[in-house]
Image: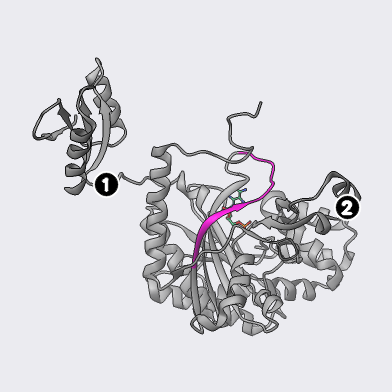
Amino acid sequence: MATVNPPRGMRDFLPADKARRERVLAVIRERYRAHGFDEIETPVMEEHARLHAGVGGDNEKLAFNILKRGLDADAIRAAADDQAELSDLGLRYDLTVPLSRFYASHRGELPTVFRSIQIAPVWRAERPQKGRYRQFVQADIDIMGDATSRAEAELITATLDVMDALGLAGASVRINDRRALDAMLDVFGFPESERPGVLITIDKLDKIGPSGVAAELRERGSDEAAVAAFERFLGSLPAGGGDFGDERIRAMLPAGVPDEIVAHLVGIGEAVSAARGTAPLEFDPFLVRGMGYYTGTIFEIAHPDVSYSLGGGGRYDGMIGRFLGQDVPAVGFSIGFERIVDLVAIGEGDAGEAVVLVHDRDVPLTELLGHKARLVAAGARVRLEQRTKNLKGLLARAEADGYTGFATVAAGQQDAEVKPLG
Ligand code: AMP
């Protein structure tokens, strides 16, 4: 018999959990909207070919593919090795691929610079563990049609504003640029064909340290002169901290990285600083972020209370062009909702009056629903409960569920007077 548990890595939410999640989502949505972003919705499924177009990086391997309808066992056996033959659709593994398709499809109906909000579940067939699910909610903002640092500055200020509104003050943004990474690897002499693999190793710097990275690069068979130059550079870097700005960024990059990349980053810092009074940005020349589609700035949110990132994003100027045949600059920032929802201390909010209407068994249904309708019309939330011997227990349970008042009704009673609970 089928189990009553949800599928592995997916969760049910009890009313209290669901209410809490919705309160956090409401704060995120409200702050995003305050910054001029507009919410859209896209289907949970996309065409198989679109989800496997080579832009989703490792996430493509984690996609849940959907079997074509009406395939019989012979057809499945015959096509066993051919995913595209078996599957025409899949569940989205992020919100960026659907957004790019959405933009290509609706461009004529959208403003030249379009600021979108998408808050929705995505699916990845990962090995479930704490904080890592197979269905999870992402909260994304994206700006399409703006190639300047204004877009990054708006995304970063809006996201930091959300963190403040959720009581996660102290959040900061680690920032880098894929073009800076590429220029750096070029300066050290890593041939272009090796760079994707080299980036995977550099991404582990936080975990395995400079000597670990150098050792792994040698194991990979990377060019020895390039590895040695990179190792020397790692050893020469200034300590962490320091104000974000031209001087700091240049001190953390080898000579030869183009000025325009540094200027783009400096411009973002200045704008965020003007908006917030300070710019909680940290330049991290080794921040990689895995997604294959990033083409420029990349960033992650860090918070002193946790060792993992609370969200991330970057510029993906090439992706819409794949669907539209014409490049459109785009940059996005995704909040890892599941990771912040547990961190946030958020109150009940003002849910208004909530009344439990306790009725005797013999109250005629017409009378009972009449009482209920009057209370609902007066603005209360109303739950019906038939009186039990343990009235105290019944009321305690209602109070725990967030109810604020109760009324008792007997057959023939005219008015249901509401008294406070607790
Ligand atoms: P990504 O699309 O991989 O860049 O992820 C964006 C954000 O989603 C990350 O910062 C994580 O916080 C969150 N995230 C990624 N994978 C999972 C997962 N399996 N379960 C829960 N949250 C996730």
Which quadrant, please, contains the N terminus? top right
- Residue type indicated by callout 2: Ala
**Quadrant in the picture for residue 199:** bottom right
The image position of residue 285, as x and y in percent, is 65, 67
Q: What residue sits 59% from the left and 71% below the top?
A: 102
Pointer 1 residue: 351
In-front residue for pair 18/235: 18
- Residue 315 in sight in this render: no
Pointer 2 residue: 79
Is residue 417 shown above or below 270? above
Q: Report the mark closest to the observer, 1 or 2.
A: 2
**Quadrant in the picture for residue 214:** bottom right
The image position of residue 378, as x and y in percent, is 16, 48
Q: Which mark is residue 332?
A: none
Badge 2 crowding class, 10 Å Cα cut-off, few under 14, some 14 to 19, many 20 or more, is few
Q: What residue sits 49% from the left and 60% below the top?
A: 172
Left or right side of 303 for 89 = right
Is residue 270 shown above or below 298? below
Q: What residue sits 67% from the left and 72% below the top?
A: 253
- Residue type indicated by callout 1: Ala
Left or right side of 250 for 221 = right
Left or right side of 33 for 193 = right
Q: CA distance from mark 1 to mark 2?
A: 55 Å
- Residue 57 in sight in this render: yes
The segment highlighted magenta reads 117-129
In-front residue for pair 289/397: 397
Q: Secondary structure at mark 1?
A: loop
The image position of residue 321, as x and y in percent, is 68, 79
Which quadrant, please, contains the C terminus? top left
Is residue 141 shown above or below 365? below
The image position of residue 344, as x and y in percent, is 41, 47
Q: Secondary structure at mark 2?
A: loop
